[in-house]
């Protein structure tokens, strides 16, 4: 069921381009394009320095326009988690897509096979992860079914190993080899390497803890790779890593591709990590613009609640760009945020004041919005440069 | 900036109507229409018995089709929290709309005034809440501006008092009277009564605690009403209440209108309340259909994470409809959910198994989806009866 996720941008919205940032309605998700561009350049430079491929996760920004921008800067393609995200990226002109996740439902695998063929015709490629023999066989069946009477396409298949996330993937070792062997029995499948992502390690707060966690990951990946290679099967690529740990995978000599996505926008949760000295200095580039719509003696209320930003990784930080002092953002429900003066500040914000919120977690925050408003020249004094469609928003299946 | 929030339903999606529930792709938000209809009938009967108006909150379902269904069952109209929600409801044919929230930005108030005029022309009405003198004056200005050269419309204005929520609203008493007096100075505004909603009371777990909390609310409302009436100003209506506390407001003799919305779908958080004996027995009618896409020795992984359901009020409950035993749903991130056997059950779900999740909180969960899949005849054996568009999804401004 490939659901169209395209929503036309309204004329009102497009008229915003060229206007001052102060004209942006609230709540809106706003991207500081200057900061985003600096993050992008730093990532590109980091990858060049380490001679490593980067394939940023589009589950974060869910925008084919941003995917293409990153590929122009040197990214080899995108990762996605869902078939529908892959379809949205392809519809937006992205031709090198990796579904870094398992797909086992036959109806979805038919869509995967269709997309593999369409991308092959466009001289692109589709890749996918597996963690079960049944999954490999179903994928092969879907590719065979799609091929009936048409040209053959090949899909790249990565074996996912569980390197500490405790979610999908087979344990490092023997089972990964079995899956690689099974993949090689099916002509429309190409064994492309190992998927090894340790999500929990991303938010270990100290750089040392992340280095220790990834050191163990690297040992597990290495032993698994050697096991497979001893059977004469080349392991072309190990892919994984997030914004929190990527310096470790990049330095490992084992990983060939980084999947970090959040570096582009950053969020309050990643900012709470101690920065590894080897890590580029990424900046906050994603903000919810909110406005005070009620103000009392003790607190003010802004018009952004958790329908405007995700709170799975904590509440947003309220950024004060004027010298009025610091604020705490407290949960006010679906549509409201409470603002209280904090850390010595005594002044409650007045009606109409603008507040910029740094979301706790960028990925699910972006997924709440149909579009991003891109600003150049700063949040306060800048102007709207473009509207970026979140064309994979709600692409769940 | 009235952003269009309409997304066309795809043909693939419409083809689902008439098919068995097993054909619904995952993850999808599914409504048990039989259970929903029972909830609706119980609410209508409850309101009739208490001779009280009901105006369910559309911030919950964000669907003009469901709003109209409720009005056919006896609801007087809808509440919304946002101007854009009001616009979406009006575009969907709802003509009696109450923005139970403050709007102070002049650009938004121009939209409010425009909508008030359009609804008046359709023999409907718009109402709004205020909690500041400045807000009243701006609203009056916007209505005056809109009236230039056209017919006059009047907007109903409720004074919001803070009865324990600690969010918007003036304290009960003197300030509310001042706002009522100010409203009456502006011909396009009609003082319609008091907005008094105690959100925090909804989730006090014992029925007694909720009764105690609302008893205090009623005292505050009553004293404020008397203060205003002593000035010769009639207080036509007190409006408020949620699904958790509505039996108390209904029995108060003070409230004339109930805003409860969640009763239609229910959620895990409301189900965790001790039911007040006076409260109708509302059933779960909203589910995320999910599927196991990875299965290991200790746990399985389903394809629904917190991009499919909100977790602000806790994780979803995993409902097992077959006799395989109970499961715990653990957070697996944006796109995954971990399923572990629980409470004596030993069996890990197999690949492909369907899991039905009861969301922790219905409102922000619905807001993640473009549509609801309506099923009749039960989740397991039933068939798809209709696709319900969530036409106010993402209507944030």
Image: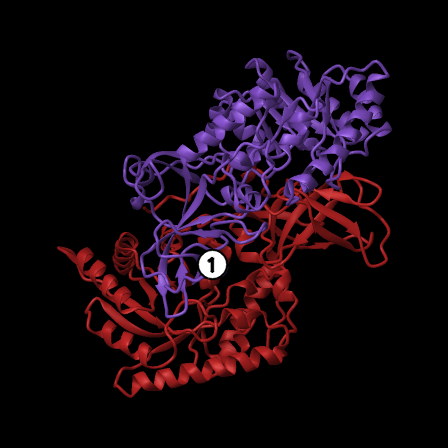
Chain colours: A purple, B red
Query: Please, is residue B18 above or below residue B60 in the view?
Result: above
Residue B26 in sight in this render? no
User: Which residue carries the number 1 mark?
Assistant: A328
Q: Position of residue B116 (x, y in %)?
A: 28, 59
Secondary structure type for disc 1: strand
Chain name for mark 1:
A
In the foreground, B58 or B101: B101
- The outermost residue toward the top is A151
- The outermost residue toward the left is B149
- Asked which quadrant contains residue B135, the reply is bottom left
Residue B200 in sight in this render? yes
* Label total for image: 1
B35 to the left or right of B77: right
In the foreground, B4 or A35: A35
Residue at 86% of width from left, 16% of height from top? A231
Q: Position of residue B370 (x, y in %)?
A: 51, 44
Quarter of the figure with the C terminus of chain A: top right
């Amino acid at each position: 069921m490939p659901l169209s996720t395209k929503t036309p941008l309204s004329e009102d919205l497009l008229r915003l381009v060229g206007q001052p940032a102060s004209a942006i309605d609230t709540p809106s998700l706003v991207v500081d394009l200057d900061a985003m561009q600096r993050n992008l350049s730093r990532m590109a430079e980091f990858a060049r320095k380490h001679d490593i491929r980067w394939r940023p996760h589009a589950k974060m920004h869910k925008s084919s326009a941003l995917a293409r921008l990153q590929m122009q800067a040197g990214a080899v393609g995108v990762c996605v988690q869902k078939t529908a995200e892959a379809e949205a990226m392809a519809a937006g002109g992205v031709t090198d897509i990796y579904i870094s996740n398992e797909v086992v439902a036959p109806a979805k695998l038919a869509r995967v096979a269709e997309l593999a063929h369409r991308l092959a015709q466009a001289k692109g490629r589709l890749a996918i992860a597996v963690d079960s023999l049944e999954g490999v066989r179903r994928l092969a069946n879907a590719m065979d079914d799609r091929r009936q009477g048409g040209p053959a396409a090949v899909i790249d298949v990565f074996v996912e190993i569980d390197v500490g996330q405790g979610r999908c993937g087979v344990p490092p070792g023997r089972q990964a080899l079995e899956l690689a062997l099974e993949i090689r029995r099916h002509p429309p499948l190409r064994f492309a390497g190992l998927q090894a992502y340790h999500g929990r390690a991303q938010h270990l707060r100290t750089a040392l803890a992340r280095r220790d966690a990834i050191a163990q990951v690297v040992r597990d990946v290495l032993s698994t790779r050697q096991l497979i290679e001893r059977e004469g099967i080349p392991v072309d690529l190990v892919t994984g890593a997030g914004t929190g740990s990527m310096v470790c995978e990049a330095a490992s000599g084992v990983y060939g591709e980084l999947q970090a996505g959040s570096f582009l926008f950053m969020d309050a949760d990643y900012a709470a990590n101690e920065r590894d000295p080897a890590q580029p200095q990424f900046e906050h580039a994603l903000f919810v613009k909110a406005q005070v719509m009620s103000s009392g003696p003790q607190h003010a209320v802004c018009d952004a609640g958790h329908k405007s930003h995700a709170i799975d990784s904590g509440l947003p930080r309220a950024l004060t760009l004027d010298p009025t002092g610091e604020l705490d953002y407290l949960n006010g429900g679906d549509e409201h945020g409470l603002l209280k003066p904090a850390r010595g500040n005594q002044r409650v914000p007045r009606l109409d004041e603008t507040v910029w919120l740094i979301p706790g977690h960028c990925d699910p925050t972006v997924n709440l919005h149909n579009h991003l408003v891109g600003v150049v020249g700063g949040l306060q004094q800048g102007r709207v440069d473009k509207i970026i469609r979140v064309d994979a928003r709600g692409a769940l299946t």
